[in-house]
Image (cartoon, rainbow, N blue to C red):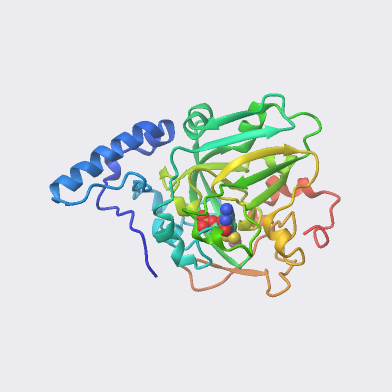
Amino acid sequence: MTSTKYSSSSIKSSEITPKQVYLSRRDFIKAAGVIAGSIALSACAPKAMPTTQALPTPQDPSISKKTDELGDTVNSFDDITNYNNYYEFTTNKGGVAPLAAQFKTSPWDVEVYGLAAKPKKFTLDELIKLFQPEERIYRLRCVEAWSMVIPWVGFPLASLLKAVEPTSEAKYVRFETVTRPDEMPGQKDRSYPWPYQEGLRIDEAMNDLTLMATGMYGGELPAQNGGGMRLVVPWKYGFKSIKAVIKIELVAAQPATMWNTINSNEYGFYSNVNPEVDHPRWSQSSERRIGEVQRRDTLMFNGYAEQVAHLYDGLDLKVDY
Ligand SMILES: Nc1nc2c(c(=O)[nH]1)N[C@H]1C(S)=C(S)[C@@H](COP(=O)(O)O)O[C@H]1N2
Ligand SMILES: [Mo]
């Protein structure tokens, strides 16, 4: 497995505090540039740092010791950034990081439109200034039955939606990933219905757990994890958490989603984590936490039942999967 190194030895976390990163991405980029430049000088590096490449992310070593609300320790930065599902690059989980190294995550614009009184196109910098991203440590459970614990930096999607004032006709939210086949070689494979799209019911979108992630591990959001900005819905299978979002549309009807379009027998619209509803080809009753040997029991709604079970009152979760 090849790996792109966001070397912890090259940038001391003490030199860039996570707070600065959350508050002002532009200042962070300046600071990182200065530090990267001084490293290049001291090492007499013959090549300049390519400016289009994702900048190294400062890793705060104290973050790797943090736990989620169940006491589960976060996965390592290396695991999170080198074991990825991102079909726009490749279907090989270890191959995403090296291919994503050339993907431009800045500048990044997100258009929020549709059934809203005040539709608006935002820059990522504007969103960060407006909504003050915070750290949220969530479990991510892939439908393939592996999981990780990831310290995201982000803000509630609800804050962004409220800012554009959804009309009463808005019942669903549709999300779309960027289309850039020149930077995303997997998008040249025409057997997938690009762009990747996802959707949520408006009440799911408005739930406080639902995050727009702008960072990770106290730093920027690496390209392979969905930078510029991605959705994180921790009680649903990982494919709902769409990466590299550029469009958020308020709509009246349930939108088409990529995996449901490809295979509706295996991937539903809701796709809530549920140990009692197996995937047609494998059990969902247990999962493999990356970095662990013993399998764990899958938790209903991935352990977030208290916050979200009420959203599904009256639904038969075996039918509406
Ligand atoms: N645009 C896009 N978003 C995506 C995917 C993808 O292939 N393309 N894969 C999904 C799947 S299957 C999972 S499990 C998570 C993985 O996120 P991670 O690589 O940050 O852990 O991203 C989801 N979001
Ligand atoms: Mo996944």
Left or right position of 311 against 233: right
Residue under the image location 84 percent in, 57 percent down: 316
231 relative to 74 in the view: left or right: right
Residue shown at the point (70%, 65%) measured from the top left? 275
Residue 298 pos. (x, y %): 64, 64
Residue closest to the eye, 214 or 284: 214
Quarter of the figure that contains the N terminus: bottom left
Question: Image quarter for residue 170?
Answer: top right
| Residue at the (52%, 54%) spot, across then down | 181
Q: Residue at x 52, y 40 (%)?
A: 154
Of residues 79 and 229, the one nearer the viewer is: 229
Is residue 229 in sight in this rendering?
yes
Using the image as rendered, state which of residue 19 and residue 44 is in the foreground: 44
- Measuring from the top left, give residue 115's x and y in whole percent: 74, 32
Could you say which is closer to the camera, residue 106 or residue 304?
A: 106
Give the percent coordinates (x, y) of residue 104: 43, 46
What residue occupies the far top of the structure in this picture?
A: 118
Point out the image quarter for the C terminus: bottom right
Q: Is residue 141 visible?
A: no
